[in-house]
Image (tube, grey):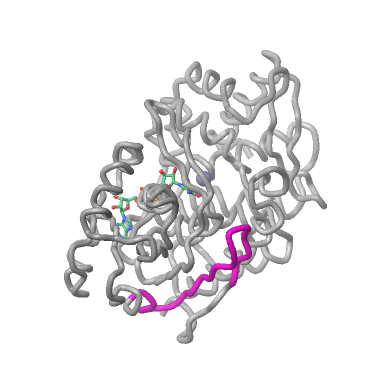
Amino acid sequence: MYGTSDPIRIAISSAAGTYSVVIGAGVLTEPLAVDGTVVIADRYFAPYLTHHGVTEPIYLVADERSKTLSTVDSVLEEMRSRGLRRDGHVLAVGGGIVQDVVTMAAQLYMRGVSWSLAPTTLMSMADSCIGGKSSINVGSVKNLAGGFYPPSEIFIDPSFVETLPQVDQVCGLLEAVKIAFCRSEATFDEYLGMQNASDFTNLATTLKLVLEAKKWFIEIDEFDQAERRVLNFGHTFGHALEAGTSFRVPHGVAVGIGILAAIAFVEISRELSDSEERLRSYVSSVVSSVTDMPEIAQTCDWELFRGAFESDKKHRADQYLLVLPAGGDPRIEVRAVVRSEDSRQRVVDAMRAALEMRY
Ligand SMILES: NC(=O)c1ccc[n+]([C@@H]2O[C@H](COP(=O)([O-])OP(=O)(O)OC[C@H]3O[C@@H](n4cnc5c(N)ncnc54)[C@H](O)[C@@H]3O)[C@@H](O)[C@H]2O)c1
Ligand SMILES: [Zn+2]
């Protein structure tokens, strides 16, 4: 199950050196048993770690409210109390929340200690585990502080998806298809051929495809200055929807709906390509498996939506920067649109059209 029996390996180059991803059932067993490693894990995995004989792990609650500098501070204290030295090693086990906190703590501890990562959610396996970013919430502002500090190794055991709630599986798939679509027609075709929302038989192979696609972006633009920005596809619309629904719509689902809105936005002025049609059909079927989109359209607070869209940190003083499907090659473009009530209304109309499935 979950793909091949031999582990799959991918090497990622970064300014901090090359690090590797290993994908396969059971790949975490060995690193868990290395003496002197301090394990920092999502509390959900307490029984699993006990079963593997891990002593004195540091547990985190995987909740947005944990992603603070004060959590990082207490993790640093816990690392110190376990006698972790500059030449020691940390292993993080969990999804994006644990990853964000541990990336930051590992970077700060004695000015940097080596660490590895075992992502346990589909989003973290397919997307966030590579790239080396950390993001910490400050006050009410999400992901305001952060840095780059890649792990030395990433161990992906795809069988962890089994226990993941369906909505978290869907969130991972939506970030994954975004990456595959942005990379190339061939990658997108391959993705659609191997992955649907209810069958994870080929997950190891899907993860290889998607991580190699993301690798291309992060290796040419490690610090998010150019090419990597297209991976924000769906995010400007999606973040505004998260705000408009007071975060009732989970991030990955909001990104999926954001992709549908970006497609609706360009459809006003041109015909969609075949590839864009197929993206829309895949995304809407995956989103609809967990969400009632027309119901979101009725309950979304559109003033909150507009406010969040207006204050997105990626925009310029006089222009919105929208990541939109471009119809061919390039597949995605970052388009500057003059800030005005008209263009803001077009964004709201596109989101409404997406939610009401007017296509
Ligand atoms: N640093 C980055 O590059 C980056 C990129 C994208 C997102 N993020 C951040 O990631 C966070 C979201 O992370 P996430 O979506 O991976 O989820 P998460 O870490 O928030 O976990 C979601 C829920 O799933 C549970 N869980 C985790 N693995 C499980 C498993 N295998 N089985 C059952 N339950 C499991 C957790 O306990 C939690 O309740 C956000 O804070 C986001 O900002 C970071
Ligand atoms: Zn995202």
Number of marks in picture: 0
Q: What residue sits 38% from the left and 55% below the top?
A: 95
Residue 2 in which image quadrant: bottom left
Q: Main secondary structure of the magenta part?
A: strand
Q: Position of residue 248 (x, y in %)?
A: 37, 34
The residue closer to the viewer here, 139 or 308, is 139
**Residue 184 is covered by the magenta coloring:** no
Q: Position of residue 286 (x, y in %)?
A: 49, 53
Residue 217 in which image quadrant: bottom right
Q: Position of residue 283 (x, y in %)?
A: 56, 50
Q: Is residue 62 above or below residue 158?
A: above
Question: Left or right: where does residue 350 sit relative to residue 337?
Answer: left
Q: Residue furthest bottom?
A: 6
Question: Left or right: where does residue 103 sit relative to residue 164?
Answer: right
Q: What residue sits 41% from the left and 80% below the top?
A: 1
Question: Left or right: where does residue 293 sit relative to residue 102?
Answer: right
Q: What residue sits 68% from the left and 33% below the top?
A: 322
Q: Is residue 135 above or below residue 119?
A: above
The residue closer to the viewer here, 224 or 283, is 224
Q: Residue furthest top?
A: 341
The magenta stretch spans which residues?
Answer: 11-28
**Residue 13 is covered by the magenta coloring:** yes
Q: Is residue 94 above or below residue 245?
A: below
Q: What residue sits 51% from the left and 63% below the top?
A: 196
For the C terminus, the quadrant is: top right
